[in-house]
Image: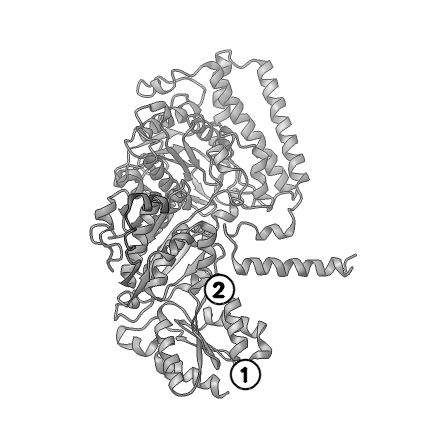
Amino acid sequence: MTETQHRASGTTAPAPESTIKTMTMAGAINAGLRAAMERDPKVLLMGEDIGALGGVFRVTDGLHKDFGDARVMDTPLAESGIVGTAIGMSMRGYRPVVEIQFDGFIFPAFNQITTQLAKMHYRSHGRIEVPVVIRVPFAGGIGAVEHHSESIEALFAHTAGLRLVSPANPQDAYDMIQQSIFSPDPVLFLEPKARYWDKGDVDTAAVRTRLDGATATADLGRARIARTGSDVTLVAYGPTMRTAMQAAEVAASEGTSVEVVDLRSISPLDFTTVIRSAKRTGRVVVVHEAPTLHGVGAEIAARVSEEAFYHLHAPVLRVGGFHTPYPGAKFEHDYLPTLDRVLDAVDRVAKH
Amino acid sequence: MDRHGPLSDDGLVTLLDRHGERLADPDWEPYVEHLTAEDLRGFWRDMTMTRAFDMEATSLQRQGELGLWVPALGQEAAQIGSGRAIREPDYVFPSYREHGVAFTRGVDLPQILTLFRGLEHGSWDPAAHSFHLYTLVIGAHSLHATGYAMAMDRDGLVASGNPDADGAVVCYYGDGATSQGDVNEAHIFAAVNDAPIVFFVQNNQFAISEPTTRQAKVPLARRADGVGIPSVRVDGNDVLASYAVTQWALKHARSGAGPVLIEAFTYRMGAHTTSDDPTRYRTRADEEHWAQRDPIARLEAYLLKHGELSDEFRAEVEAEAKALGKRTREAVKSWERPPLLTMFDHVYAEPHQQVEAERAWFDRYQRSFTDEGAHA
């Protein structure tokens, strides 16, 4: 309604309903999926137990009821089949969002993801777009059994053609799931399952104008300075962001100013933001749950040494998992990068 | 011959025997009765052209112009027969040996060779020919084909009420692929979704060196029984029968009745690829046995017997085949590698910081030689 019409009718515009809501991260992903499905009828969900059950983590709760079988498809129990058929559907203009039930179960689909999904755009000279989103509840910390706590990012980040992102809070989860869906590239959307029930405020309006393919994809690739600081740069993403923020808080109380970079995206990796911060602080610690050997932290350490060598006051340190299989749940509190281990690394670089 | 194993010829639909005699089969007659002598001559031409191209590609590989070639010798009838049953808006997912099907889809055959010369991984525009790119990971495309078929169904291209407007997917793979998890998953996804897809298995009896007996204990068509997909075994060296069963299968799939599996029993007369050496794993006698069943000779015998293959037409097709060979040779030898930096193109649809940075660095690196005259 235009302003003139308002005056003519003698009414006043109703106060807009607040677009800020408190949500859990799981709820934010659910709301983001719903918004994307409402926006574009080509968006559809595929996965095991995502229909009537709403997924084992209930992330798709209620969507089957509202969108029906055609939009929320319970699939046969076959991960390669899920990803492979999603590729075929995307070739006809659909935007499938597939759920892999747990990180450790993605490997039957490893071939489809790395040799097919990642390469289709390249080998077709850009003629075929495959905008498939693969949602994966990932990482540990929930006392789960074997194969339910894996950090899989490095295994996929090594493959050109894929984008990998991981939100660390409900707002990013809400925005990034939609931006992943409307990006023309395939995206692995890594959901830190231990953070599913963390609550936060979500503005549901802001992302609406940032969902065209180019903007959405560019936004996805940007890291965020979650906390500014001057002594040490702490780089984290997804599941380790909470520990990183706690570490910064404790360090501040001990007189060390820590800047926290939330990567948000693992591929591409926003080195510009990381290097800028590294040059400012001269000290960098990377924290992830995945084993440090051959990991994302190793890549960051190498880049920082290449591009910020003369600004460094200390070697880049990594805090993460060990080169062992993910151990039994009774070990995980010590296997994972705990607050103490992160603070230990911060102290070591600060005192260097 | 074992009557029950995967190499049995039990129950094969045959309309043209190996001597070119036409066999009556009332079940399949309706699918071929509209074919004219001119259509059959067309099949013969298609097969002859495909083979000429195939032989040329093998020589080009032997001359070092191609890194590798995968001959389709002996499989021309299965490919031309099925390919000629396909029409718009059907869509085809080949493996990597479907040169005959490519021909029926209007792909300019020499274009297939860019992949084998190492210039690119794809080639033709899939949408322009309703013919997807070759897939080298065995069976991986069967899932894409199934998903594509599921999407065609959603898009109203199946059982629309106008059978002439309906479409389906045809997915080609070989005997070896039937052991792959992806192919079995494709069967399951297709079955439970009633996807409009025809799985066309060319059992050419070898997965490189391994006979089909290393893949199965039963005829491959029976793979379909376990998932509830109707299937048929056809003499894959009989172009008429291959055409007939594909017509039937496509009609079934397009009508919304779900997937079909066709096993075309044939023989790979050539090597798996130009790197292969079939003398290490099969006998001369076996090859000779199958040479007697050459798919082109069979149709030729039939046409000659009925006075439908004039010397004039033969000469015309031979000249056309020769010209295709010449054009293939000239094209392949003329292809230069595209500019180096194009290897960074299309990795992503939207810019990716690391790819862009590497492209820019590599560009500077390359220019550093020419700009400074180091290589002048």
Q: Earlier in the sequence, mark 2 or mark 1?
A: 2
The amino acid type of the residue labelled 1 equals His
The amino acid type of the residue labelled 2 equals Leu
Residue B88, position as x, y percentages in the image: 43, 28
In the foreground, B127 or B326: B127
State which quadrant residue B24 falls in: top left
The residue at 26%/68% (across/down) is: A144
Residue A209, position as x, y percentages in the image: 41, 52
In the foreground, A282 or A2: A2
Q: Quadrant of the N terminus of chain B?
A: top left
Q: Quadrant of the C terminus of chain B?
A: bottom right
State which quadrant residue B262 falls in: top left
Which numbered circle lies on residue A223? none
Farthest residue toward the top?
Answer: B307
Q: What secondary structure is marked by label 1?
A: loop
Residue under circle 2? A269
- Judging from the image, mark 2 belongs to the subunit labelled A
In the foreground, A77 or A229: A229
Residue under circle 1? A313
How many marks the image carries: the answer is 2
Q: Are marks 2 and 1 on the same chain?
A: yes
Any part of residue A104 in sight: no
- Judging from the image, mark 1 belongs to the subunit labelled A
- The image shows residue A198, relative to residue A284, as above or below, that is above
The residue at 30%/49% (across/down) is: A46
